[in-house]
Image (tube, coloured by chain):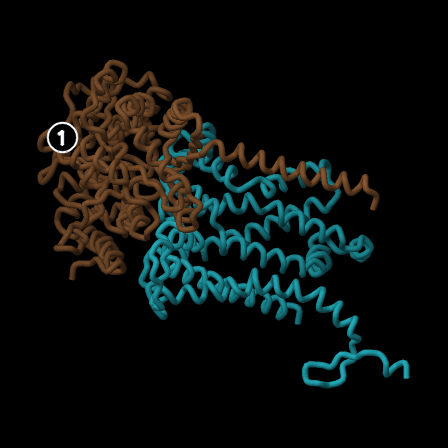
Chain colours: A brown, B cyan
Amino acid sequence: MSKKKVFLIVMTGMLVVCLTGLVSVTGLAKTTISIWTAYPEMHEFQKRAGERYEKLNPEIDIEATLFPQRALEEKVAAALPAGQACDVLDLGTMSTYPYYVAGLFEEVPADLDAWLRKNFPAAAIKYSTIPGTNKLYTMPNYISLKVMFYNKDHFKEAGFSTTPETIEEQMMYAEKLVQYDAAGNPTRVGLDLRLSGGGFGTSQKYWTQVMIPYGTTPIEAVGDKWQAAYDNEWGQKALKYYLDAVYTYKVESFEVKSDAEGFGLGVTSMFQRESWVIGYLRDNAPEINYGTFLMPKGPRGWGTVGNMLGICVPKSSAHKKEAWAFAKWLVNDENMIRMFGESGWQPYRANVDYSRLYKEAPAIKGFVDALGTPGHEVIDYELISPVFEIHSRLAEQLMIGFKKPELRDPKKLAAAIHDMAKETNRILDDYDLLAK
Amino acid sequence: MAKKKQSYLRGWLGRQGSIKRSQMLFILTIFVPLISLFIIIRIIPIAATLGTSFTNMHLIRPVTKFVGMKNFVRLLEDKQFISAFFNSIEYVVVAVPLEIGLGLLFALMLSRKIKFESLYETLYFIPYILPMVPAAIVWKWFYSPGSFGLANYLLESVGLGRVPWMSNPRIALLATIGIHVWKNLGYFMIIFLVALKNVPAEMREASKVDGATIWQTIRHIELPLIKPIILYGIVMATVWSWSAFTEVYIMTQGTDISTGAEIQVLIYRVFQEAFVYHSMGKGCAISFVVFLVSLVIILVQFKIFRWGER
């Protein structure tokens, strides 16, 4: 081999080594913090917040990724145990707590813990605290609190100047609001109860809409164990309310578009949802003249489900310190107001004045008030490992039940409820959490 | 002498082999990677699935215990599993005859000289090459409730009443099977068409000279000659119907369409148990049931065809 060839090979090798080094150094110059969420409106907010954070911290690069809700849950299930998850995870406590138990999430650092206790309501701290300890495993961020949305024009047309206060009144209102075409097909539902959907959403709405008013709940604590709490007269009444709405009073129908889309299309007069709908309606159906009211009272209870969405940092994150710093910055006063205004999702922060948003979106006030109305209970999911499975399997069974008009027969209704409760108890038993 | 110098490989039992060392090396080089891959990709996962089905393995619970037949016993009491099992049976019973019957019918029609033959072939084959997820999403819109979906809109525009495509559990399952048939029909049509085009033209001509009708030609010449391809088609259609998932999954997601767990099939149940509830033990038990039933169905199909040949 000639000297020239040897020289060329050595030079090429050195060039490759230098370039590799240069690329590595450039890569190291910026720390990438990835954040995953399941909500499009929240993703847009996080993207914009990330850009602002990058300007304040040029050494940080924020990478926000959006997954559909169920896809995120599946992604987390696969990526977290494999150590391939994001640095900052924005997800509900019912989904994240089992992973904490499995040792996959960091606890909140002590300095941040102290700051959170000063700046978030007691309920937010309660549902972020590891049961039996005084430590937080997730940082409270926003709350998925449910209120009723109603179409003001539909109400006016039906002669209503006030909103229903009880679930009986709600059904009566719905009967006047529902509309049919000449062939008897429903063209507008009076009350959209959320009869279907993936995951646990259907049971969550059912819990809010009927279980709380009838004074029941999916599971209840018995000492340090748990059991299904709805295999009784009140659990049966709750399911019957849904069946009556669909088959007896015919105020709800499978044949009309439902949820926020149905409300935005003007084919739903009342439905229960979270504050993100404000942003959805602003962007997709600005012509809808709507308002909100608190979930109606029932004979045995008044309140709503307000499940918290927190921020967790996986143990596998290579940049935990930077991840927590970004998380804390995300919940500062200015970002909380921006989050509410831009995404529609309701921040859980206390001592922040949101009133500047009321003019543009008056419905926001309804959500802020819902957190502080005396007597109106805000309930979250219990922090136990199988809670996601319990609610998701209950949702599966409910969706099947909603399509069975024969369940209005008291014996069949009792048997169906008993079957559901049996499954709930079986799951608790699998986790050695069933009260004997 | 020269023959003695040749190296012969001894057989497994020490007998004098008849294959030269170089030939044996060639065989090993060719087959060992293939057999290894088959063991790694097929045998080990099946064995691992069977092993896991006897445990309470949970994706996010660190301790796994051996639970014997508990997962299988539970399946017998699980209404969701039983409903999914019968839905899967319905899937096979409805989809396979439709895919094979219509596939054959269209192939027989296209194998005759007709105008725009290539255009028809392309049109029938397009659904097969479309990815299932976007296709199922379009179908979801097609079946949307009330007058929001194209299906009901078309029915109403010709004076017919609306159909509760996705809210009536019986119709919902058939409507979902319809998506499956629409997707795979083109594939079966094409393989049958290729088989029919390979039937020697002289045989058709001879039957024509002998005065056979078209139906007699089809029944006594064409169908017997493409029988192996029909068997292949039936096996594939059965496997695909038995393991249908994507269209069912898409149809059960979201709140704008009223399907629920009542249209679930076995693979959907595997997905729910293993990846939604993280219960790998139960998910694997269902997978093993799917595997065993597939095996039985296919063995029966082979038996029937061989019996027919006799």
Name the residue at 11% across, 38% down: A301
Q: Note whether A397 is above or below B36 in the view shown.
A: above
Query: How crowded is the residue under tag 1: few (<14 C-alpha within 10 Å), some, or many (20+)?
Result: some
State left or right for residue B136 relative to residue A167: right
Which residue is outermost to the front?
A3
Which one is nearer the viewer's eye here, A87 or A376? A87
**Helix, strand or loop at disc 1?**
helix
Taking the image as shown, residue B43 lies to the left or right of residue B278, namely: right
Q: How many marks?
A: 1
- Residue highlighted by disc 1: A169
In the image, residue B205 above or below residue A204:
below
For this rendering, which residue is in front, A133 or B161? A133
Quick one: quadrant of the C terminus of chain A? bottom left
| Residue A417 percent location from the top left of the image | 21, 52
Q: Is residue B170 visible?
A: no
Residue A130 image offset from top left, x and y in percent? 22, 47
For residue A17, what is the image quadrant?
top right
- Which residue is pictured at 80% across the width and 57% down the height? B203
The amino acid type, in three-letter code, at marker 1 is Glu
The relative height of residue A319 versus residue B229 in the rendered view (above or below) is: above
Q: Nearer the viewer, residue B136 or A350?
A: A350
Subunit bearing disc 1: A
List x then y, in percent, for residue A67. 42, 37
In the picture as drawn, the residue positioned furthest to the right comes out as B1
Q: Specify the quadrant of the image occupied by residue B202.
A: bottom right
Q: Position of residue B237 (x, y in %)?
A: 56, 54
The residue under the point 22% across, 40% down is A242
Residue depicted at 59% across the width and 67% down the height: B304
Q: Is residue A402 above or below residue A367?
A: below
Determine if residue A320 is in view.
yes
